[in-house]
Every structure is written in structure tokens, then in C-alpha cells.
Amino acid sequence: MAPPPPSVVIDARAISGITGSISIACWIIVFAPQIYENFIRKSAQGLSMTFVVLWLLGDIFNVIGAVMQGVLPTMIILAIYYTLADIVLLAQCLVYSKGLSALKASQGVDPIHLSPATPLNEHDNLLESVLSSDRDYFGSNDDMDTDTTGLGSDADLESFLDTDGISGNVGKMSSIYYNTLMVFLVVLAGVLGWWISDSRNDDTGDDPVLVFDTVAQIFGWLCAFLYLGSRVPQILLNYERKSCDGISFLFFLFACLGNLTYVVSILSIDTSYNYLLVNSSWLAGSLGTLFLDFTIFVQFFIYNESKDECSFSDDEYDNELYDSGN
């Protein structure tokens, strides 16, 4: 008869193990949403190049510090994985930006026209050429007035084809369900990973004594400053663009969740002076980036709400024009 399975005791060590495993799961999947979104859009314009470069440098120092400190092999492998994922993001930024520049050059488009800081009304000839080409394609207003298709005018056609009010709400709900499902699956994977490793780990020995390594601490603080500095260019870029388009929400959500669970995993095991001193650089980097990632979350909600209000105002304006025309 098989022995009964060992009971699961939720103590400080278990909480540290669970949150640490969830943190690892978040950091494994964190880059996938952004890499996938860049690949689908064939563009990385939403990402700040400085943000990616600083993050890459931070991960490189993280690899060096992990090797010098002699941490677990799994942590070294994860640090190398982070570095490789950063390189993929940087390659996407370089390749897609080069492709966009080549496309602009081949089409004879002045890049200044595509700058959000340059309104189109300052270039009347460009706006006029676009409007004239639209007239040539759709015909004159007289032709549209005598249309016998039952739609009658441009306003009727736009009103008939306008489904933003429906598809927008459906898209928001599906996005919420999708993000919630992804977070649940990652958290579940972390908990299962801890349970499997804990059930196979029979080591009840004492934890090794932490030694303050000056060189490792230098690399740890370099990582912390680079991680903190990497968020600032992204926040400024979002502020200048008044948009978070091109940035994956899950990218920063998993980064935020990974940092939060990482901090909990450290503080739940010990809060002694020596323990906090040894882990101070990693705690500072995680807590600081957690605050800055929260700032990016606020930008997501503010700019998406502003975009929705703008879209709603445009719909109201179109309806007023249609009513006045009748």
C-alpha cells in the first residue's frame, strides 16, 4: 500500500517558494507578448530604443553578477535567457525601423509628415493632394447625391459601416478575459512548479550563510540603476506620443507581477539586517521598477480612455452632420 502524500504546510518558507516560483514563471513569459506583438505589427515603434538597450545592459550585468556570486544554475540560465530575449527585442527594433525607413524612401514620403509633433494642416499641399485623390476615386458630391443604392451619401455609408460602438466593447471585454486567463495560467504554472519541486525536495538542512560580496554588490547596484533608468525613456515616449500603441499590456503586467512576487519571496523568508543588506540592490531594483511600471499602467488607462472619448466625440460629430444634412 502506497504511503499517503505528504501534507503541505504553508509557512514563511512555503510562501517564499510559491511567490519565487510565480516570479520565475512571469519572467519566463514576460517577453513573449511584446515580441509577438512586434512580429504581428511588423513594427516596434511603440518601444523606446533606449528602454530596450538599458534593459539589455542590466541583464548583461545580471549574468556577470550571478556567475560571480555563484547562485543556483537555474538562476544563471534564466539570466542568460533574459539577455537573449532582450537581444531579440533589440533586433526587432532595428530591423523594423530599417524596413520602415526603406518604405518611406521608396514611396517618397517625407518622414516629417509622419511625426505626431507636426500637424498636417501645416502642409496644405499634402492635405489637398490626399483630398483630391479621394474625390477622384469616389466621384464628386453630385454623383453621391444621386446614388440609388439606398445609402444616399457618404454619411449614410459611414453610418451603415460604423460598428465601433459594438466591436469596441466586445474587444475590450475579450481583452480583459484574455489578460485574466493568461495571468491565471502563469500563476498556476508557478504554484504547480513549486509544489512539484517541494514534494521532491527532502533537504531539511539550514540555509547557507550569506556573505556580503563587494564585487557582486557593485554589479547588483548597476543592474538596479539600469533597470530603473530603462523605464524613464519609455514613460517619456508614451507621454510625448499621448499613446501606448505598440506596447503589449501583458509585457509590463508580467514584469510588474514578477517584481512584486520576487520582493515578497525575499522578505517573507527573513528580515534581518544582514539579509536585507545583501539583497538590498535586488530589492531596490525590483521595488523601483514596480513603481515605474505602475506609472506605465496609469498611462495605459489614461491614453486608452482619451482615445475612446475622442472616438465617441467623432461619432457624435458625424451624427450631427448627418442630421443637419437631412
Image: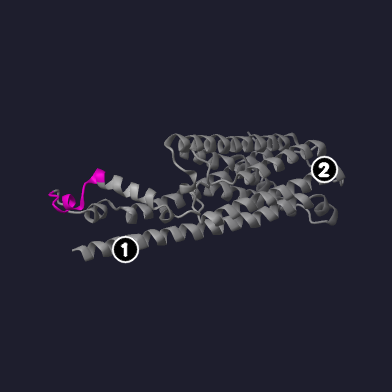
Rendered-image quadrant of the C terminus = bottom left
Q: Residue at x 37, y 53 (%)?
A: 168
Neighbourhood count class around disc 1 (C-alpha, 10 Å): few under 14, some 14–19, many 20 upward: few
Q: Position of residue 225 (x, y in %)?
A: 73, 50
* Residue 70 placement, left or right of 148: right
Q: Residue at x 20, y 53 (%)?
A: 141
* Mark 1 residue type: Tyr
Q: Position of residue 282 (x, y in %)?
A: 75, 49
Residue 213 appears in the figure: no
Question: Magenta segment, which residues?
Answer: 136-148
Q: Main secondary structure of the magenta part?
A: helix
Rendered-image quadrant of the N terminus = top right
Judging depth in this view, the residue of 104 and 268 nearest the camera is 104
Numbered tag placed on residue 284 in the rendering: none
Mark closer to the chain start, 1 or 2:
2
Q: Position of residue 69 (x, y in %)?
A: 81, 39
Element on which disc 2 rests: helix
Find disc 1 in the rendering and name its residue: 317
257 part of magenta stretch: no
CA gap between label 1 and label 2 equals 61 Å
Residue 27, quarter of picture:
top right
Neighbourhood count class around disc 2 (C-alpha, 10 Å): few under 14, some 14–19, many 20 upward: many
Count of number-bearing discs = 2
Q: Residue at x 42, y 52 (%)?
A: 123
Q: Decide: is 94 above or below 310.
A: above
Judging depth in this view, the residue of 292 and 14 nearest the camera is 292
* Mark 2 residue type: Ala
Q: Position of residue 153 (x, y in %)?
A: 20, 54
Find disc 2 in the rendering and name its residue: 216
Residue 33 appears in the figure: yes
